[in-house]
Structure formats: structure tokens, C-alpha cells
Image (spheres, helix red, strand yellow):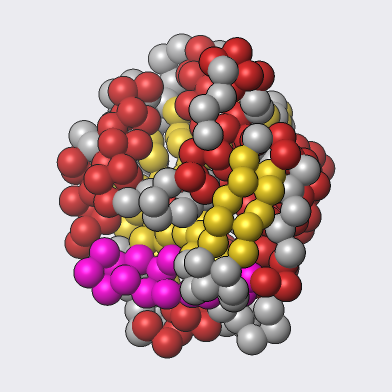
Amino acid sequence: MALPAERIAQLSSFAEDVRAGLTASRKTLPSKYLYDAVGSALFEVITVLPEYGVTRAEERLLREHAASMVAHLGATAPSDIVELGSGTGQKTRYLLQALRDAAPTVATVYRPIEISETALQACARNLADIAGLRVVSEQGDYFEGLGRACAARTPGQPLLLLFLGSTIGNFGRDEAVAFLQTVRATLSEGDLLLLGTDLLKPVATLIDAYDDPAGVTAAFDMNLLARINRELGGDFDLRRFRHEARFDAAAGRIEMHLRSLCRQTVRVAAADLTVHFEADETIWTESSHKYRSDDVARLGAEAGFGRLASWEDQRWPFAETLFVA
Ligand code: AVJ
């Protein structure tokens, strides 16, 4: 299906990514497209599902250990706190408050970086009441936002970068190291990184977390097809697909897939694309890597970070690790 070059250039990056993903021999779609307004709202529901312990575990860690985390940051309180994928900023509040308590006179700038405008607005609203905190929202790509944040930082003061929620798990292990290396290259020596990673746990627990019985995660996954229909003129029949969670033990990851229930052909107008599906063929929509605690330290070390401290939740194995650049 050859397209003239200028026609390809006109396609939005969403259309281009859909085209690339659905024409690959193993069909995939980038997980970042799960988070439109509907997807972000569904993800918020996922975070309160009894089967999805990730967000509550991290919230417990930040609530219970924020003061200890701040104590490990070193003598100079960071003046710039940057967060990659802030979501609505609810968990970050504990840390921001502990920082303010420890250093009430330091003027702190908090820069949440988000692709989702909806989440970003909620985040700025949620944190508006913290005394002495300036919230500067950065809508866009992680590295774009991080670049801007580093350019605007207070000179001579450490920067604290937050990468919470186990979003790092969306990358493969090698990709995660490469990502952290790029982060490290953007930071200065002495800057800090707080990384949240979900840890390995029994497979049945993981499957329940990513294929909950109420079907919220299924709706979250399926919304990706609905979004293609809405934004790119697709004609996916959602009733002909089913959400599935799988665990790949060798790779240590949970995968979300959308399984085609029959042989079918789907058209995506804005991507100038006709896709054939065999019965049982799947679109791989997300990976969530689960780590062992000692592997988290190794991940950081391979990217040029030193581990300062870590905190783990016992109820739902999850690690918050503080690194120094
Ligand atoms: C936001 C990427 C951390 O992988 O656990 C939740 C997304 N996907 N349920 C995760 C998600 C299905 C979540 N992250």
C-alpha cells in the first residue's frame, strides 16, 4: 500500500504510529495513546480498583516515608521538582508537603510534565493550596518537558526528578536503561531521581490487576480502538475484540492485548489503512515490566545513577528508589 511521501508527511503522528503498528507482522499500538480524556478517566478508576494495588502501594510509601525521603535528599533542599507523567499529582502531594515542612523558606517550583491536558489541569488544581509552591505545567513529551525544565532551573541548586507509578515498566529492560541514560545526560551531577517500580508478584495477582473482573481495564484497553474510530475515522467494531492480560515470565512483564474474535478487515481512513485480522490475532497495546528489588538498583547503576535509599511496600510489593546523578 504505497503512499506518496507528501501524503505520509501530512498524517498526524497518531495516524503514523497507528499505521506503523498495525502493518507490522506482530500488530502493536503504542501505549501512550491509551491516555486521551476517556482513557485518563478510566485509568483513574483503575487506580482505585481492589485488584490494582500499584497506586495504593505507592501512595502508602509516599505517605509513610515522605519525611525520610526528604531527609535523604541531602543538605541542600531541591528548588526544582520535576515530574514525568504526573497524572493528577495526588501522591506527589505528600512529598511536596514534606519538603515544605523540612525547608519552609525555600521557594520551590514544581513542574509536572504530562501528555494528558486533562490530568495536567487536575494536577495544578489539586496542588494549588500548598504554601509557597509554584506549579508550572509542561504539556508534552517527557524529554521536551525535561529539557525546558532543566533550562529554567535555579542554578546551583539540586533538581529532584520524580518518575513514579511504575511508568518505567512500560519500557523493556534495555529501553528502560536507555531512557534513564538520556535522563541522566539531561541532569547535572548531584541531581536526584525518585523512581517508582512495581515488583514481581504471583502471576494470578498480576493477571487480576490487569484484567479486573469489573472490566475497567478492558474498557481502558478497548478505548484505544474507540479513539482510533473517533479521531482517525476508523471502523473498528469493538464487539469483535476482547481485552486480554498475559504474563511473559521470561521477560518479567504483563502484556495487554486486544484479541480479534474473528477474521475481519478494518479500515482507518486518516491513516489510509486497511488492516486484516485473523481470528485470535492480537494487537499488543501495553507492557508492564515487573522488577526484583536488586534489579532496580542495577537498572539505575547501568544508567549512571547511584542508589541512595529505597523503600518497599510489604502488602503490594513495590519499590520507591532514590538515586543520585
Ligand atoms: C500507568 C503504565 C503504570 O502499567 O500498571 C494499568 C498502566 N495499564 N492497568 C501500569 C495500566 C493497565 C499502568 N502504568
Q: In this picture, is 96 found above or below 291?
A: above
| Residue 231 rendering spot, x and y as whole percentages | 77, 41
- Magenta segment, principal secondary structure? strand
Count the numbered circles shown.
0
Q: In this picture, is 215 found above or below 4?
A: below
Q: In this picture, is 310 found above or below 23?
A: below
Residue 315 visible (yes or no): yes
| Residue 137 rendering spot, x and y as whole percentages | 69, 29
Residue 195 visible (yes or no): no
| Residue 72 rendering spot, x and y as whole percentages | 36, 46
Residue at 43% over, 61% down: 288
Q: Which residues are magenta?
A: 241-257
Residue 319, by quadrant, is bottom left
| Residue 64 rendering spot, x and y as whole percentages | 51, 66
Q: Nearer the viewer, residue 267 or 189?
A: 267
Q: Nearer the viewer, residue 316 or 272?
A: 272
Q: In this picture, is 282 found above or below 276?
A: below
